[in-house]
Amino acid sequence: MWQANVFTIFPEAFPGSLGVSIIGKALLQNKWKLKLIDLKNFPQKSNRIDSVPYGGGLGMILSPTVFEKAFDSLTSSEKSMKKYYLSPRGHTMQQNDLLLLSQTPGVTMLCGRYEGVDQRILDYYEFEEISLGDFVLLGGEVAAMAFIEGIVRLIPEVVGNQESILSDSFQNLLLEYNQYTKPKTFHNLSVPDVLLSGNHKKISDFRLEQSKTLTKSCRYDLWMKYISNHLKLS
């Protein structure tokens, strides 16, 4: 069973969005597991989990000795899972990264708060720093939920129709095509005729061309990756 271990000082923030819809149902059905480790349960002798930074500065820093005790509460198999620290200086995860992680036993995530964590935690335990994008949150909990959701939805049997994932944005380096439903006309805007034709080949070709056009106009960087990838395959 795929498992996410999350170190946090706010375990009450979870499962949050991970507890609703398909993801939440899969959690209740034990198709994946969420293990929360409350860092407040492993205080120093001073009953604190953080300290002021050496060299001065504002805010408090998570103590490495506190994290050591928390990390030692994991089983040996849990300790061996890939470890990530949610950080604005981390690299932005890609869809293929999440796909690869969905095929592993699980991940361990450390959610920072306030001024962050002692660098030696990241160095000694070999945490990889990852980010949602170029903006700052109050802590890593929301980012952790986003990454976990992105991974769990790729686990077989979590999403009802696994084939629908194949048309997701980023899955094949293209953005997803536009979608339409009833009514046929809405405020003088009509559904493209080809989608009403019943010709599956034409519909498939239309959607592919639309994905290419959208990717080229909205995410040119992604479009260039798509072009480069196809040149390598040709």
Image (cartoon, rainbow, N blue to C red):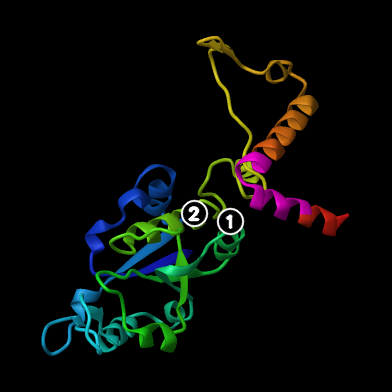
* Residue plotted at (45% across, 64% down): 131
The answer to whether residue 218 is magenta is yes
* Residue plotted at (41% across, 56% down): 30
Q: Position of residue 124 (x, y in %)?
A: 42, 89
Image quarter of residue 5: bottom left
The reply to whether dot 2 and dot 1 touch (C-beta < 8 Å) is: yes
Q: Which of these two is toward me, 172 or 162?
A: 172
**N-terminal label among 2 and 1:** 1
Q: Position of residue 123 (x, y in %)?
A: 43, 86
Badge 2: residue crowd in 10 Å (few <14, some 14–19, many ≥20): some
- Give the left or right position of residue 110, taking residue 167 as reference: left
How far is disc 2 from disc 1 in space, using C-alphas? 8 Å
For the record, the magenta segment spans 215-227
Give the residue type at disc 1.
Gln
Quadrant the C terminus occupies: bottom right
The residue identified by callout 2 is: 150
The residue identified by callout 1 is: 95
Give the mark count. 2
Main secondary structure of the magenta stretch: helix
User: Is residue 49 shown above or below 22?
Assistant: below
Q: Which of these two is toward me, 142 or 55?
A: 55
User: Is residue 64 shown above or below 153?
Assistant: below
Badge 1: residue crowd in 10 Å (few <14, some 14–19, many ≥20): some
